[in-house]
Image (cartoon, rainbow, N blue to C red):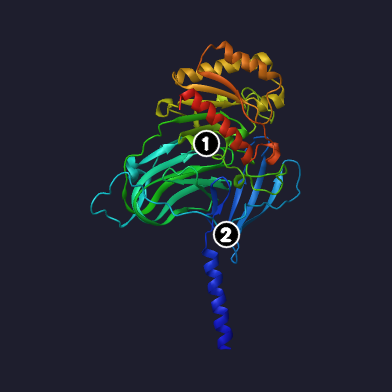
Amino acid sequence: MKRVLSLILAMMLVFALASCTDTPDTDANGTTTTTAQSAQETTALNEGDGETNATTQAVGQTQANSSIATTTAVKTTAGGNNPTTTKAPTTKVPVTTKPQPTTTKPLPQNVDYSAKDFDVNKLGTSLRVVGRAVNADNKVTAQFTDGGVEFNLICKGDVTIKINWTRGPGLLGVVINNDEQNVTNYKITTSTKEVTIAKGLKAGRYTFKVIKLNEVSLNTFNFLGVKFNGILGDKATQRKIKIEAYGDSITCGLWNMLDQHGVDGYEQGYYQDGYSTYVGFAARNLGADLSVVARSGWGLIHSPYGLGYDGAIPKIWDQILPSTIPDLKWDFSSYVPDVVVVNLGTNDKTSGKPTAMEMSNEVKRFSKELRSKYPKCAIIWVTGMMGDFGGYTASMQAAVKQLKDDKIKFVSLPYNTSGGQWHPNLAGHKAAGAALQAEIEKILGL
């Protein structure tokens, strides 16, 4: 009997240890995905963006006897009441190396490596806002894709961020020491309050970038602070090259993590990586900062998904938190890009509402508005990733020529519709990113 009890206790211990294991998944693009929570229940309300109008109730469970993360859900779509199973990406053993401290600057003497628990206000100049986000009320809030924070620490051991995540489940991306080829993605839900983004670090200087990978309609990311062992690092500064992008679902990375057209049963927030997009790859390869203003289903002038002429990106281009505080306006002097990328027209083509002349006029008007904020930047209008803009393409190209501005270009990127809902998959985004990167390098003389 005692041997049986001992065996049962041993099995329970193994079960408990397996449940605590957080094993990430590394894909061919240098992206690692891990689950930041074990079991929780969330309700995701996807706002009306046409492709994603659904309410999802999900329960996420990490299996105790393996490293596979499975999410089960009941999803009700606008078209009916048939329940489906919502899937999350599988998690495998990663092939990664532990981040090493930077060695460009010696450490100060007698560093205090005691445990710290700092809110945003205590991080001072070692913290900066990344992308279209705002630092206010002792938190940094991001709704747009790729918005978040970057902070510098002199530390060792573990680093854990404190967060508040609202609305639907999704992904956070983490980059350590500017290693843009190795991004770790963490699956987040509304019950996730802390995420350990580094473990067992050697004493040294580290830079951590934490960004929201989903679009504005899916969720909101609030960065509340960080727990670490050490002291604050140097002042956080913007990168030498800065890129800003305006777009629709392509720029959001909608369903780019699927290599199939069907999306039934897949949790959208876990299959949308807004940093592994054409402009994300270009920025990462250039070591550039990236700010994104994009929404699925929206157009340059008109959205075909119920929003009509209200679904135009130029109408929200100056906003920071469109889902909650649309009157809060962006300070354009806080981030002055070297290059602005505009990928709009696919949804206008789908709706067929604007005339070719209206599209031409809006290309010229929006280009001039961008130029008024950024007198020296290059502006690249792009097309082609889901096909050209049909009858609009020629008029938009002509509009760019009529502006007679050598720093405004019209570029066609490689076609790919191999991802979910006929959107580009990761391979398609990577190919388009290489083409965009080459164009940026040519424009900037790199």
Residue 5 coordinates in the image, percent (x, y): 56, 83
Q: Nearer the viewer, residue 58 or 107?
A: 107
The residue identified by callout 2 is: 39
Which is in the foreground here, disc 1 or disc 2? 2
On the rendered structure, is 252 left or right of 198?
right
- Label 1 CA crowd tier, 10 Å (few <14, some 14–19, many 20+): few
Q: Earlier in the sequence, mark 1 or mark 2?
A: 2
On the rendered structure, is 228 left or right of 342?
left
Tell me the distance, in whole angstroms, between the alpha carbons under discs 1 and 2. 28 Å
At mark 1, the secondary structure is: loop
Q: Which kind of residue does numbered mark 1 sit on?
A: Thr
Report the residue at 58% width, 13% height from top.
Answer: 401
Q: Nearer the viewer, residue 336 or 227?
A: 336
Report the residue at 60% width, 45% height from top.
Answer: 269
Residue lying farthest to the bottom in this orientation = 1
The residue identified by callout 1 is: 324
Residue 42 coordinates in the image, percent (x, y): 59, 51
Picture layout, residue 199 above or below residue 235: below
How many marks on residues? Answer: 2
Picture quarter with the N terminus:
bottom right
Q: Nearer the viewer, residue 216 or 378?
A: 378
Q: Nearer the viewer, residue 131 or 259?
A: 259
Picture quarter with the C terminus:
top left
At mark 2, the secondary structure is: loop
Q: Which kind of residue does numbered mark 2 sit on?
A: Ala
